[in-house]
Amino acid sequence: MILKTGEYLCLEGDKASSLYIVKSGLLSGVSNDCGTLHYYGPGSIVGEFSLLENAPREQSLRAVEDSEILIIEQSVLQSTLEQKPGWISSILTFLAARNHIAQENKKRSDLIQALPSLLFVFKSHLQESGSDNIRLSTLCECVAAINGTSVHDVDKLLLSLQDLGVVKIQGEQIQDKVIRAESLQIIPLLYETLRYRALHQKVSPNILSMTDQMVLSTFIKLARESKAPLHDGLYAISTEQLKSEAKKSMHGFTLTMRTLAPLVQKQLLQPSSSYDIHAPLESIDFFYADFDKILDLLELNRIFPLLDKKLV
């Protein structure tokens, strides 16, 4: 078969009834699912896995230049395999399945690796522009320049972030879409958390233990009931109030100096006097903290495990 430049050999999703061998010329293959462009020159075999798995075509194939294509129909391939030992067909089917799994794992891996780049571009734009939004076309262009991520994958990541309440996607067409940050602090926090984990291969200090989350949630509850902040968004809660509310909301849990030590060390809670882990908690009159900072951290700790689950 002779394929002229620009002509399509098959489209993604077509029923696979044959495999192709490129005798001369050059084909390009692209999938809407990943957006990555592949090239197939003389000697390339294309479509064998779709044929063996009886699955739809995984990509659209188009001639980059005039090309000669050898087409082997499924019936011919099946007849040839029947003349070989039975185990050959089983091995080929097994390899086809393994290839499919490998491709799916690569797609997930590419998606996970693309997330920090997306967050970095968004974070940088927010900081430089002072705005709370970015055009999708700009975001896609910058992320593609960093690691070649397709528009499809960027859109997929943004939908996951929107499901978690991190961003809001506005507009219908790609060229008109605008991505708005629901919180100006969550995007940078999420980026720094992922970056820390990648660099140090351990959990970021931004990720709180369950106990720390419950203590901070108790502080937020009391701060909301308080009349007014001290200054600059700082709220002070008496130690007695904190202990009493923690006992109710944390199912009888008793706060101690040791319990609060990690939060004091991270400067999320500030004691009214010098902190001695061996002293009784009552030696501290009150604790104060930045209301918005705690809210952002609690939101990050809600989002992070859900996002990991969505991508992995």
Image (cartoon, rainbow, N blue to C red):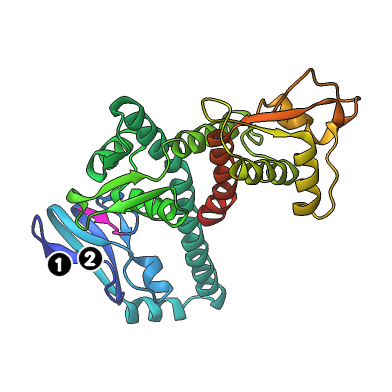
Q: Residue at x 37, y 72 (%)?
A: 51
Q: Quadrant of residue 293?
A: top right
Q: Is residue 224 left or right of residue 110?
A: right
For marks 1 and 2, give the CA distance. Answer: 6 Å
**What is the secondary structure assignment of the residue under circle 2?**
strand
| Type of amino acid at the residue the image marks with label 1 | Met
In the rendered image, the quadrant that contains the N terminus is bottom left
Place of residue 104 in the rendered image (x, y in percent of width and height, measured from the top left): 47, 58
User: In the picture shown, does residue 154 fall above or below 125?
Assistant: below
Boundaries of the magenta span: 27-32
In the rendered image, the quadrant that contains the C terminus is bottom right
Mark number for residue 1? 1
Q: Is residue 74 left or right of residue 114?
A: left
| Type of amino acid at the residue the image marks with label 2 | Leu
Q: Earlier in the sequence, mark 1 or mark 2?
A: 1
Q: Nearer the viewer, residue 146 or 49?
A: 146
The residue tagged 2 is: 70
Q: Residue at x 40, y 66 (%)?
A: 49
Specify the principal SS of the magenta part: strand
Q: Residue furthest top?
A: 274
